Image (tube, grey):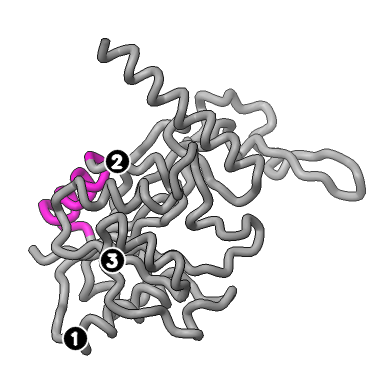
Amino acid sequence: MNNIAIIPARGGSKRIPRKNIKPFLGVPIIKYAIDAALASGCFNEVMVSTDDIEIAELALSFGAKVPFYRSVLTANDHATTADVLLEVLECYQQLGREFDNLCCIYPTAPFITAQMLNQAMFQLQQSNALSLIPVTAFPYPILRSLQIINNCVSFNWPQYAQTRSQDLTPAYHDCGMFYAMQVQHFIKTNTILNERTLPIILPESQVQDIDTEEDWKMAEFKYAYLHNLLKLNND
């Protein structure tokens, strides 16, 4: 199989300026994604899609490829992940290269490991799945969630107000780490989730969405804790 890892990393992040190369525990955060992809050994190409010269230079120094720059259309605030991936695949086609499977790896997901990526690509290739994503369970049942209207609290779903938590169907959310998928189906449908999307279920301790400075600090805390714990267990 001919596999490509695509790391989308534009330069114009708004909520956390220069987010994609901001130091995470002293290391540019994009390096974690690049290192995991390279260490996995399951990709014929590990590339960074960016519109930013500094990001491109860092990506190259970490061992990734930057064969072309992202267009203005896919570097704006309204471009979707699918838009970026399709552009990358089209650019490679123009260079005479095509791939069987792709893995979109977000640059601000330091919890990604080579083992996760290996598991994802192995499952994708050995099953009849069209795509695969990591998910984690909501820490509290969403069917018992609350809403605030006119400064008053009420249940979103009152019919579940007396239902025991353990009797409610678990709900999951996208970890925002990576997506693995078959290239041809993705090109045809322009969608990542479909009727044959498999999950990789991760514990909440290995997941942290990073949209604010507080998120960033929490991610660093989790990462440091996990790696210190691993070190203690290996001693």
Based on the picture, tell me whether residue 144 belongs to the magenta stretch. Answer: no
Specify whether 158 is left or right of 104: right
Tag count: 3
Q: Residue at x 51, y 40 (%)?
A: 208
Q: Residue 104: give its label.
A: none
Q: Which residue, given by chain and number where applicable, does mark 2 sit on?
A: 113
- The residue closer to the viewer here, 11 or 179, is 11
The image position of residue 71, as x and y in percent, is 44, 84
Task: Point out the image quarter for the N terminus.
Answer: bottom left
The stretch of residues the image draws in magenta is: 115-129
Category of crowding for the residue at label 2, using alpha-carbon neighbours closer than 10 angstroms: few (below 14), some (14–19), many (at least 20): some
The image position of residue 152, as x and y in percent, is 89, 41
Q: Residue at x 52, y 68 (%)?
A: 11
Q: Which residue, given by chain and number where applicable, does mark 3 sit on?
A: 47
- The residue closer to the viewer here, 91 or 192, is 91
**Toward which corner of the image does residue 114 lie, by quadrant?**
top left
Task: Point out the image quarter for the C terminus.
Answer: top left
Does dot 1 land on a helix, a strand or a loop? loop
Which tag, 2 or 1, sits closer to the chain's start? 1
**Toward which corner of the image does residue 229 lie, by quadrant?**
top left
Q: Is residue 181 visible?
A: no
Q: Is residue 219 visible?
A: yes
Amino acid type of disc 3? Answer: Met
Q: Specify the farthest residue to the bottom.
A: 94
Judge whether 56 appears above or below 90 on screen.
above
As measured in the structure, the alpha-carbon distance from the residue carrying label 2 to the one carrying label 1 is: 30 Å
Amino acid type of disc 1? Answer: Leu
Q: Main secondary structure of the magenta part?
A: helix
Q: Specify the farthest residue to the right.
A: 150
Question: Which label lies toward us, 3 or 2?
Answer: 3
Which tag, 3 or 2, sits closer to the chain's start? 3
